[in-house]
Image (cartoon, rainbow, N blue to C red):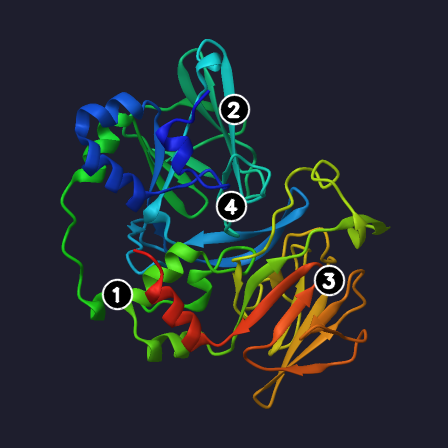
Amino acid sequence: MPKTVLESLSNMFGRVKRSELRIYAEQVGRTAFLEFVSHPCLVGTGRFAGEFIEKAKDNNAITMEFKLASSQDAIREENAATGVHESIYPLIVPVDHLMGSKRFRIGRSNNNDIVIPDYAISGEHAHITYEKRAYWLEDLLSTNGTAVNDTPMMQGQKVALKDGDCIKLGRFQFLVVWPAALYALLTQPTPPKQAVESSPPVLLGDLTDAMGRFDFMYLKQYCRHHSRQEFAKLVVYPVFVGAAFFPGAVWQREEGSVDTSRSLSLKAQGGRVRSLAGSMFPLIRNPNSAQSAGTFVIGRSAAVDLRMNDLTISKQHARIEVKEGKIFLSDTGSSNGTSVNAVALRPFVPKEIVAGDRIGFGKNYFIFLPPERLHINMQESEQ
């Protein structure tokens, strides 16, 4: 069965770029839009101000408890703070499920249908279930809760969603819209932007997700509105940019990691392992990190600073240390090793790295790209 418009535009996290759907709506017009877009969507509208106050174990991962600021108004994120205002999550029910049911899992973990990579979102935060021709929302005992039209949801409660309902998930706000309302929202005139002086400063942490990586779309937006000098103040050190993934077979070597000396099928990898090529990891600390300042841990564990979700990378694979303006990389006894410019590192022996170096973690290779080059690349990328 051919994909619908929303399925074609959705990425692996279940998200559609608002800018792309807006272009489609303007090109085809209202009649054709309503003919080919037939499912309701969650449209991101803002993020609530506040602060993280403590961490909580949640579904084998770490969720941060979030305390809302005194003002309950959601902040529009025009400066790409997390870009939720650009996110649309369609609730697509296949034709053969219309008379039955379908569940949409929402959370921070990659095995959800709708993935929101933020520490205020629990690993498994909520469900939306299509049943009896209605969409029902249910909170899954999330750390920071779920609310509908400013009313917090209680344990075991299910709420039937209606066109125009406002949903709060953790620190994010979404609007439930059916196709007609979605078309009107996409094609309404863009309000004039506020003066730069009135906008809050953007922090490096605002541009990264819970895995410590840049989101390409939001980084591109930031670079197009800020100079290279401003970007250099925000991103001080070079960035790990995924350049290649080397296929090969793997076999189990230690708990939770694999050796890449032999082949591993996609089925054996659970069907969810994806190449890190194209992923961009700046040197940024995990809010839960117990490391000293200037130290960054790289691995697959939820507790590391740069989380690289690939089975060929160990839970705690390598370590970065910044000393007197120099950057040192060391392997921390990983299963599949770390290399610099194709030369394998001896475990626990630091090696100085500089911009332009080719770094290997397991079967993944990265370019240690200088900030100024990354800024140029973002500005030159396609509109």
Q: Are marks 2 and 1 in contact (CB under 8 Å)?
A: no
Mark 3 lies on a secondary structure that is: loop
Q: CA distance from mark 2 to mark 1?
A: 38 Å
Residue tagged 4: 121
Marks 2 and 4, the one that precedes in the sequence: 2
The reply to whether callout 1 and callout 3 are in contact (CB within 8 Å) is no
Tell me: 350 left or right of 204.
right
Camera-nearest label, 1 or 3: 3
Residue 131: x and y in percent read: 46, 15
| Label 1 packing within 10 angstroms: few (<14), some (14-19), many (20+) | few
Indicate which disc residue 103 carries: 2
Instruction: Classify residue 33 by image quadrant.
Output: top left
Label 4 crowd bin: few (<14), some (14–19), many (20+), radius 10 Å: many
- Amino acid on which disc 4 is placed: Ile
Q: Which amino acid type corresponds to the residue marked 3 in the rendered image?
A: Gln
- Residue at point 17% right, 66% down? 195
> Relative to 280, does residue 190 appear above or below in the rendering?
above
Q: Secondary structure at mark 2?
A: strand
The residue that mark 1 highlights is 199
| Residue 128: image location, x then y, percent | 47, 27
User: Disc 4 on helix, strand or loop?
Assistant: loop
Q: CA distance from mark 3 to mark 2?
A: 34 Å
